[in-house]
């Protein structure tokens, strides 16, 4: 009897963004995004049964349609995604495009020779990861046919690099960003995104702001987002400090002003999400760019207590280059 593990993506984003649905439709042809795992359409009767047996309380209880799903035939083990192969692909899909794919609609299914559903067992998942959330300013919250190709390439690159990511700044950034789509509330999500970005560019406690405002714009330019300049980086670092120290980001006695601040905060979270997505995806797929991040003190040096390149303590903050290795600072 054929057996498969499935993870389904709900179609609600299509209803919320009809303009993007017409101009950039979601994936419509099956595509292998990892060995043995397809991103593909799922028969309506099977999709409906999985959704009905797995969904949590929904704000859209009548919308049970599905766009597509991750499907793996003849999966190993006795429980859903026992080796976490589908889980890995789902997490990495958020490095390709902001989307609402979570672990809510997951199941192992058994079908007959005519592909009719015979039995179904919901996947055992951690409730906090049931649903993923996009920034309110995010558009087109689904994967296209072109995105499927990017996802396949990203999975291959991640598998090659994974052993070398342990205990590195890049590895930690990949891990924390991978969890960020599942954080619903703005303040903790903002703190997670800002500190993830800071951890990626900071290598020493001294001159933390200078490291951030020098390296974030440089990385942004490398991934095609030059609008995120030094001024933007400085504002983001101020936001990070407010969130970390418990200050209000929306405080105002005027409701119109509060709404403006709320909109600005939402846009900043969306911008941070997209910036980190592009940086981390490029770092995982482009060895030259990864090398710049791994050696960020040399790529974009910032003077501190000692040389940021060779760590010589003979250097002082007032010097413009290291007296030992002659590395110039910015």
Image (spheres, rainbow, N blue to C red):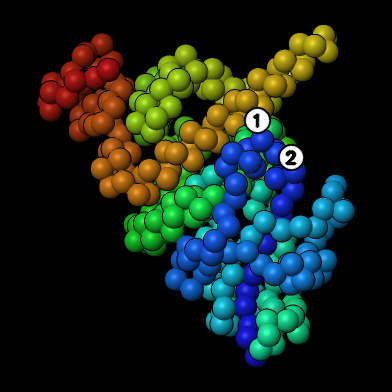
Question: In the rendering, at what x and y percent does residue 258 appear?
Answer: 77, 15
Write the residue at 48% across / 37% down.
276
Question: In the rendering, at what x and y percent does residue 31 appear?
Answer: 50, 63
Compare marks 2 and 1 and give the one earlier in the sequence: 2
| Left or right of residue 269: residue 232 | left
| Left or right of residue 44: residue 196 | left
Question: In the rendering, at what x and y percent does residue 170 appear?
Answer: 40, 45
Write the residue at 39% across / 30% down.
224
Q: Is residue 88 visible?
A: no
Q: Looking at the image, is 247 positioned above or below residue 36? A: above
**Secondary structure category for the residue under label 1:** loop
Q: Which mark is residue 16?
A: 2
Q: Looking at the image, is 13 positioned above or below residue 296? A: below
Residue 69: quarter of image = bottom right
Q: Looking at the image, is 236 positioned above or below residue 135? A: above
Q: Looking at the image, is 304 positioned above or below residue 108? A: above
Find the residue positioned furthest to the top: 254
């Amino acid at each position: 009897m054929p057996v498969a593990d499935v993870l389904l993506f709900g179609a609600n984003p299509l209803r919320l963004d009809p303009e993007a649905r017409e101009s950039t439709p979601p994936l419509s042809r099956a595509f292998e995004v990892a060995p043995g795992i397809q991103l593909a359409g799922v028969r309506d009767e099977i999709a409906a049964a999985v959704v009905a047996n797995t969904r949590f309380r929904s704000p859209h209880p009548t919308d049970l349609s599905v766009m597509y799903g991750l499907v793996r035939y003849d999966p190993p083990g006795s429980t859903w995604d026992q080796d976490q192969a589908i889980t890995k692909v789902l997490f990495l899909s958020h490095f390709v495009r902001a989307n609402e794919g979570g672990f809510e609609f997951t199941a192992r299914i058994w079908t007959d020779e005519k592909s009719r559903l015979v039995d179904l067992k919901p996947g055992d998942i951690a409730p906090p990861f049931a649903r993923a959330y996009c920034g309110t300013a995010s558009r087109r919250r689904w994967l296209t046919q072109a995105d499927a190709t990017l996802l396949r390439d990203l999975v291959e690159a991640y598998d090659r690099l994974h052993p070398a990511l342990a205990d590195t700044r890049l590895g930690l950034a990949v891990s924390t960003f991978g969890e960020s789509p599942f954080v619903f509330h703005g303040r903790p999500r903002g703190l997670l995104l800002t500190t993830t970005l800071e951890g990626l560019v900071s290598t020493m406690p001294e001159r933390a702001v200078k490291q951030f405002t020098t390296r974030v714009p440089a990385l942004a330019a490398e991934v095609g987002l030059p609008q995120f300049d030094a001024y933007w980086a400085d504002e983001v670092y101020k936001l990070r400090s407010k969130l970390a120290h418990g200050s209000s980001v929306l405080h105002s006695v005027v409701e119109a002003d509060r709404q403006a601040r709320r909109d600005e905060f939402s846009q900043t979270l969306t911008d941070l999400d997209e910036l980190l997505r592009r940086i981390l995806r490029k770092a995982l797929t482009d060895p030259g760019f990864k090398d710049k991040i791994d050696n960020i003190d040399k790529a974009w040096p910032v003077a501190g207590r000692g040389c940021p390149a060779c760590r010589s303590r003979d250097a002082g903050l007032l010097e413009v280059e290291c007296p030992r290795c002659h590395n110039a600072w910015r």
